[in-house]
Image (cartoon, grey):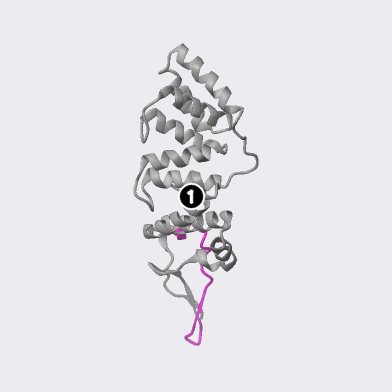
Amino acid sequence: MAGIALAVIGGTGVWAALRQPDGGALELERPSPEDPVLAVLAPEPYGFTPPYANPELLAAAESGDAEAQYQLGLTIVQRHWERGEQRRLGEAAEWIAKAAEQDHMRAQLVMGGLYEKGRGVIQDYESALAWYRRAAAHGDPQAMARLGRMLRTGRGVEKNLVEAYVWLNLASARGDPHAEIDRDRLRRMLSTEEIDRAQDRSRHIDRDLPHPTGPVQPLPLGF
């Protein structure tokens, strides 16, 4: 009579087997690697590199394709940061930086996040600010919001509440709900004259900034 052997949970994965009448064992199909529970309980085995399982993506990235470089770096972040393999973030940062240098907007945003948090690179608020500025210039609302928060707290730049309000205002106008909340809180800290000046500057900058359309790929957990 067939039975189920003990399931093993460990660093090498999760498996279960059906014990056959003849004493043999039939291994069941592994759960999907995208299963969030499996991601925590059973990280991929050491040395397993799922991003390179896609040779076309790797070839495109190596040939200089910015989108492929960004997606490859993002895949490494998603697959390995969440599984406790932080050593791979340096590799991810290298690919994402290649895309960012080619003016890939989302790659520039992620590079800002990597530098701000010190993940895969040495923490550097000035570099984070520079990358956020580049992404914001392309119209990325999350970059605008993060730029505004750094200006509000004075991280990597001289504290400037009026300029912080401007970038939070621009991010809010492009649909970032968290920027709207932060902008309204900051408003209480400004005088009427400062708010008027910030509003005028917001309108002036808004005319020159693009408004990205279409869906935006979510950032990895923790970014």
Q: Is residue 220 left or right of residue 118?
A: right
Residue at 43 percent of width and 59 percent of height? 91
Secondary element at image label 1: loop
- Can you name the residue that lies furthest to the bottom here? 22
Residue at 57 percent of width and 68 percent of height? 55
Residue type at mark 1 is Pro
Judge whether residue 36 is colored magenta. yes
Q: Is residue 9 left or right of residue 55?
A: left
Considering only vertical position in the picture, is 195 above or below 129? above
Whole-percent x, y for residue 127 in the image = 40, 42
Span colored in magenta: 20-39
Front residue (pair 177, 113):
113
Q: Is residue 101 left or right of residue 152?
A: right
Predominant secondary structure, magenta span: loop
Whole-percent x, y for residue 170 in the image = 54, 29
The residue at which mark 1 appears reads as 220
Residue at 46 percent of width and 42 percent of height? 131
